[in-house]
Amino acid sequence: MGDRWHVEVDRSLCIGSAQCLHHAPDGFRLDSARQSHPVDPDTDANERVLEAAESCPVEAITITLGDNGEPVFPPEE
């Protein structure tokens, strides 16, 4: 059984570039204000969702491990 992730989008940072949709079209949606939302905030670990977070030009997407909240992206420095 793989890791579960919790995915969040900081709407105060999101600029609606839709890069997340390009990388993970099943993982994100834009609302009428062009703000991104995860389709399922609690999801199985998924390379496409990670690519979406990495591609966000304003780093509005954060991913943590669902069981303990440990950061997946952005990584702790």
Image (cartoon, grey):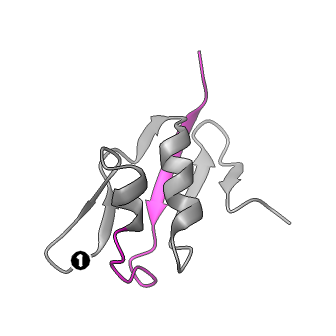
Q: Is residue 36 left or right of residue 50?
A: left
Residue 5 rendering spot, x and y as whole percentages:
54, 41
Q: Is residue 45 above or below residue 6?
A: above
For residue 21: magenta? no
Quadrant holding the C terminus = bottom right
Q: Residues within 10 Å of mark 1 (few under 14, many from 20)?
A: some
The residue tagged 1 is 34
- Residue at point 43%, 53% (across, down): 23
Instruction: Point out the image quarter for the N terminus.
Output: top right
Tell me: residue 44, above or below residue 59.
above
Q: In the structure shown, which secondary structural element does the residue marked by tag 1 occupy? A: loop
24 left or right, relative to 61: left
Which residue: 61% across, 29% down? 3
Question: In the rendered image of this protein, does residue 52 appear above or below residue 46?
Answer: below
Q: Residue at x 70, y 53 (%)?
A: 71
What residue appears at the point 36 percent right and 77 percent down from the top-left corner?
17
Q: Does 3 lie within the magenta span?
A: yes
Residue type at mark 1 is: Arg
- Furthest-left residue in view? 32
Magenta span: 1-18
